[in-house]
Image (cartoon, helix red, strand yellow):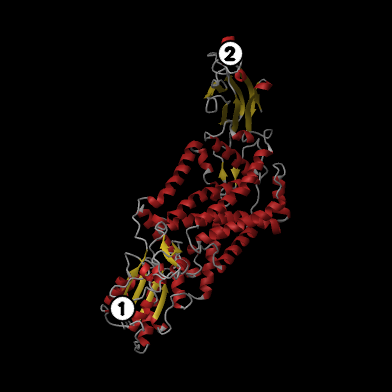
């Protein structure tokens, strides 16, 4: 399993770098696969509603109505039909790549199991929606799907009589089963939407819309494809004839040719068994979770900044339990907390300037105490060699720990947003370094979802806790990087080091807290 | 990278995406493995006899039931399996024993098969046994038919219309 993950990780690191070159970090499609899935879903839903206006749901008239949509009204409904099909296919692509990428990033393990587990049944619904849609055209492909699907379903021991009998020959064809498919094609997407909503329930501020440039570019791509290569029907269904050659949508129908080779029952076993194993991936093998964040009530005033910043909804504000004069206190859900430390960075009591021997903030990670971070910062300052002294705070996933090779001192933490902005002030005002680099994951692709976003807002004074105005911004660099972007990172670091070298010596003011 | 270069790479990425979607949405064509064959579909759903005939109850036995539950005979629920044979030009192609459906085995037995045969003239014989007899058949049909390539030939069964039907 680990080797498989590494293999995909290597592929994705290269692909991420290539897409960064084309789209920039902010619009890198690989960072927005889930949102693109939502986007394609809405395109399919919107075009589906339009097509339904012209679609005749009777089995004898369905084909003619789709022909009208495709040929007579090619400029509107025809394009909608093509968009409907191609957005459905694009949905399969982004969902599969999304699944593989989350797997490669290990963002399915431990407490992150929920999104993975709820995503697996969504796969089933995607296929139910797609296959039932092809059925409705009632052309030769639809006939093939109808017969193959019903024969495949008959391999299951659920039906007293073979449902394939509905499509035995042209005399047995009835509209009742066809009407059922129309209902399935309408209601399956609604269930899928419900599953998609559940899928993101453990994500605070879930991203369901891709950035506008990516949305526009993708929409234009699909429209151009629809105009150049419109989706068309095949010959009308004839239940007395065997369809021998079919233009095939391999995104949805790839399993069907397998029915020519292996019995339907075995194929069910492979697919259902495969999905069951896929659903178990978060626990293969079981992982010991990192200890969750801990609230210190003596230092918590119930300000709710940790509650606002938690990307996984792991913190709730509850009624005060210690009799102090504050209304609420933070409470951490052990089931939801991923130990990212964003709450620590948000807590106004997480400051290295405090005079107490042991600094205990309102909330902190047992494995990464603020006292330890302060000691690491002070210790790092004595390790610098020649040239500008640059202290790099970085997360575990950006790859910026390699800046050690450039002469920087590096302190690593789970997420860059765990670093309270006061540490930058502390480092510079105490002359512990000439400059500070905060290196987080690529833009829009934070391992803990919102870390980079919150860090930037804190540095820009848009989000509490702010970086103090007295801090010389020329001595602070916020770098968003990926493991595969080594050269860019080195260049950015070299630019920053050169800037520091040109700056006059810093004046070191003491904080009021000192 | 400058803006032009970036836009160029984006255009290539979008084009590659469109080509992937457009191509695999309809190509390569799927060719049915046995396209030159005629396809024979056999479909029947029929309830065989009960495993044992109903037994007439005596007056004493009837009297043992509650007044609103009295009946004159008692019957086994379970049905016999169907025995089916399918021959082509005198050669046995299929032999099926189809069990009754339902948890109690009291429902109809169903058979659904799709078999590919060489096109041309063939003598097709089907036999069905739906009773407790151990020899012989309750329904038999044997007829010379012409099978066409890439066309379905269906064999159905309806007791009410006398048994097997070829189409």
Q: Position of residue A426 (x, y in %)?
A: 34, 80
Residue B91's place in the image compared with A175, above or below, is above
User: Callout 2 environment at 10 Å: few (<14), some (14 to 19), or many (20+)?
Assistant: few
Q: Are marks 1 and 2 on the same chain?
A: no
Q: Which residue is mark 2?
A: B63
Helix, strand or loop at label 2? It is helix
Chain under numbered label 1: A
Chain under numbered label 2: B
Residue A299's place in the image compared with A496, above or below, is above
Between A198 and B94, the one nearer to me in the picture: A198
- Point out the residue furthest to the front here: A323
User: Which image quarter is the C terminus of chain A in?
Assistant: bottom left
> Can you tell which quarter of the image residue B55 is in?
top right
Q: Which residue is mark 1?
A: A355
- Residue placed at 59% from the left, 28% from the top? B42
A15 sits left or right of A380 in the view: right
Question: Contact (CB < 8 A) between labels 1 and 2?
Answer: no
């Amino acid at each position: 399993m680990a080797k498989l993950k590494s293999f995909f990780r290597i592929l994705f690191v290269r692909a991420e770098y290539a897409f960064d070159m084309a789209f920039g970090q902010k619009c890198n499609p690989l960072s927005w696969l889930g949102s693109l899935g939502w986007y394609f879903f809405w395109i399919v839903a919107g075009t589906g509603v339009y097509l339904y206006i012209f679609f005749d749901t009777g089995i004898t008239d369905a084909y003619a109505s789709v022909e009208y949509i495709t040929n007579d009204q090619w400029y509107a409904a025809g394009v909608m039909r093509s968009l409907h099909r191609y957005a459905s296919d694009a949905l399969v692509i982004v969902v599969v790549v999304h699944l593989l990428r989350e797997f490669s990033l290990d963002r399915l393990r431990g407490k992150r199991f929920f999104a993975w587990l709820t995503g697996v049944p969504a796969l089933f619904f995607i296929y139910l929606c797609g296959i039932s849609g092809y059925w409705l055209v009632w052309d030769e492909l639809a006939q093939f799907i109808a017969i193959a699907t019903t024969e495949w379903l008959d391999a299951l021991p659920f039906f007293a009589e073979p449902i394939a009998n509905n499509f035995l020959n042209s005399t047995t064809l009835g509209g009742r089963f066809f009407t059922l498919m129309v209902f399935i094609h309408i209601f399956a997407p609604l269930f899928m939407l419900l599953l998609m909503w559940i899928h993101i329930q453990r994500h605070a501020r879930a991203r369901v819309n891709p950035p506008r440039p990516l949305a526009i570019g993708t929409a234009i791509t699909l429209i151009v494809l629809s105009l150049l290569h419109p989706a068309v029907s095949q010959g009308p269904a004839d239940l007395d004839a065997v369809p021998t050659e079919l233009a095939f949508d391999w995104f949805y129908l790839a399993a069907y040719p397998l029915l020519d080779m292996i019995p339907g029952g075995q194929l069910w076993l492979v697919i259902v068994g495969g999905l069951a194993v896929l659903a178990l991936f978060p626990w293969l093998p079981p992982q010991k979770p990192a200890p969750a964040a801990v609230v210190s009530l003596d230092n918590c005033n119930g300000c709710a900044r940790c509650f606002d910043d938690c990307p996984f909804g792991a913190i709730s504000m509850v009624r005060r339990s210690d009799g102090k004069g504050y209304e609420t206190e933070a409470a951490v859900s052990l089931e939801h907390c991923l130990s990212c430390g964003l709450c620590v960075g948000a807590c106004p009591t997480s400051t290295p300037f405090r005079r107490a021997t042991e600094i205990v903030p309102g909330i902190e990670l047992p494995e990464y105490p603020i006292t330890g971070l302060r000691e690491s910062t002070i210790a790092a300052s004595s390790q610098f060699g020649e040239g500008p002294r640059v202290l790099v705070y970085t997360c575990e996933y950006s790859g910026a720990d390699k800046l050690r090779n450039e002469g920087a001192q590096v302190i690593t933490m789970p997420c860059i947003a765990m670093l309270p902005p006061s540490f930058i002030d502390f480092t510079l005002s105490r002359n512990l370094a000439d400059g500070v680099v905060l290196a987080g994951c690529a833009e829009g692709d934070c391992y803990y979802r919102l870390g980079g976003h919150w860090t930037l807002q804190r540095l820009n004074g848009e989000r509490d806790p702010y970086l103090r105005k007295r801090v010389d911004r020329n001595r602070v660099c916020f770098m968003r990087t990926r493991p595969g972007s080594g050269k860019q990172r080195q260049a950015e670091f070299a630019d920053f080091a050169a800037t520091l070298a040109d700056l006059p010596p810093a004046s070191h003011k003491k904080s009021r807290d000192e | 990278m400058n803006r032009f270069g970036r836009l160029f790479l984006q255009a290539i990425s979008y084009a590659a995406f469109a080509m992937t979607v457009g191509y695999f949405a309809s190509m390569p064509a799927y060719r049915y493995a046995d396209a030159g064959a005629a396809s024979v579909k056999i479909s029947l759903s029929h309830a065989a006899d009960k495993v044992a005939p109903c037994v007439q109850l005596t007056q004493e036995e009837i009297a043992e039931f509650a007044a609103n539950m009295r009946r004159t005979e008692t019957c086994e629920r379970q049905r016999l399996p169907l025995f089916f044979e399918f021959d082509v030009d005198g050669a046995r192609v299929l032999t099926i024993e189809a069990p009754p459906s339902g948890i109690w085995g009291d429902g109809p037995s169903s058979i659904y098969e799709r078999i590919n045969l060489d096109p041309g003239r063939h003598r097709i014989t089907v036999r069905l046994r739906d009773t407790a007899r151990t020899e012989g058949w309750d329904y038999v049909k044997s007829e010379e038919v012409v099978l066409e390539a890439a066309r379905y030939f269906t064999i159905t069964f309806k007791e009410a219309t006398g048994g097997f039907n070829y189409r």
